[in-house]
Image: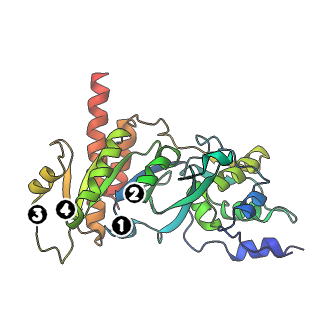
Amino acid sequence: MDSAISEATSRAPERTPLADAADTGLKIVVVGGFGVGKTTLVRSVSEIRPLNTEEYMTQAGVGVDETSGVAHKTTTTVAFDFGRISLNETMVLYLFGAPGQERFWFLWDRLFSGTLGAVVLVDTRRMSDSWYAIDRLEHHRTPFVVAVNRFDDDAAYYSLDEIRQALSLPAHIPLLDCDARVRSDGKHVLITLVDHLYKLALAQETTS
Amino acid sequence: MIRRPVDTGSPDRLYTVTGGRSHPVDTAVFDLVTLVVSECDPTPGMQSEHVRILTLCRHPAAVVEIAADLQLPITVVRILLEDLLAAGRITARRPRAAAAADLPESALLKEVLHGLRNL
């Protein structure tokens, strides 16, 4: 009779639960192309093993025979992973690794409105992947920093100045190197972002 | 009665989970990082997804964590949570920094910075 309950209990996650006083969830999004190291960065700073989830998106079908009078819809899913950092007894930061592909941006408002800010993770071997992400973040007016994940086999080691130029990145947007595998680097990237946000907020508060 | 985890590959099955509803829930209440807390224990005969949510949320858990654990899309989890909230079985702690395209207060960001530096 109570099998449903015991089954559910036995499947309860083994990770450490949040503090009972936790009341403020916060979001930071790491955006970047496939294989750039988003999950690696999330894992390096997260207190839990990264988890994966997905959201539906419904699109009008492409190439539908209009004379049929039937509204065809195709449902696809966008998957993303995330980690967690308990900042203190009440504040919890969730760090999302999000794919930079085009369809993902249709879900931005539904998933990531109210995000503190974003990290654009760049692989210099595929710099063009980052242009679109930067353009979309500017469109959504989400403040961001750009972190270059340095890969060992990167033969052409571009300087940060060269990368800033290649990305047409304005001088006030922080740009930094990191090794996404290293916890202290991941932490430094997050601190750079929140420090940037803090300065923006202070400037806004003093002018208004 | 043994129920298997929902097969996310089957939209029909998801309609069963949500009682046929697919309307978008007010995302301001159940943001990805809204923290959900159980206000009661599961009871026998309750829908298995509700049982799992109530068990999981004995300590606070974010909407996105619940979705990951139940292996269900966010939209479906939001509908399940809306039911539990309406029945008074859970409470929802909504994020402070809710307004889109607005910077959070510097005081909040200062707290975040402090937390990150102490990691």
**Of callouts 3 and 2, which one flags the residue occurring earlier in the amino acid sequence?**
2
**Of callouts 4 and 1, which one flags the residue occurring earlier in the amino acid sequence?**
1
Same subunit: marks 1 and 2: yes
Position of the C terminus of chain B by quadrant: bottom left
Residue B61 at least partly seen: no
Disc 4 vs disc 1: Cβ atoms closer than 8 Å? no
- Seen in the image, is A6 located left or right of residue A14? right
Q: Residue at x 66, y 56 (%)?
A: B77
Colouring style: rainbow
Q: Which residue is mark 1?
A: A34
**Of callouts 2 and 4, which one flags the residue occurring earlier in the amino acid sequence?**
2
Q: Which mark is residue A177?
A: 4
Where does residue A138 sit, x and y in percent of width and height?
32, 41
Element class at badge 4: strand
Q: Which mark is residue A158?
A: 3
Chain letter of mark 3 equals A
Q: Which mark is residue A101?
A: 2
Same subunit: marks 4 and 3: yes
For the residue marked with disc 2, what is the amino acid? Gln
Q: Residue at x 59, y 43 (%)?
A: B27
Disc 2 vs disc 4: Cβ atoms closer than 8 Å? no
Q: Residue furthest front?
A: A67
Q: Nearer the viewer, mark 4 or mark 1?
A: 1
Count of numbered circles in the view? 4
Q: Residues within 10 Å of mark 2 (few under 14, many from 20)?
A: some
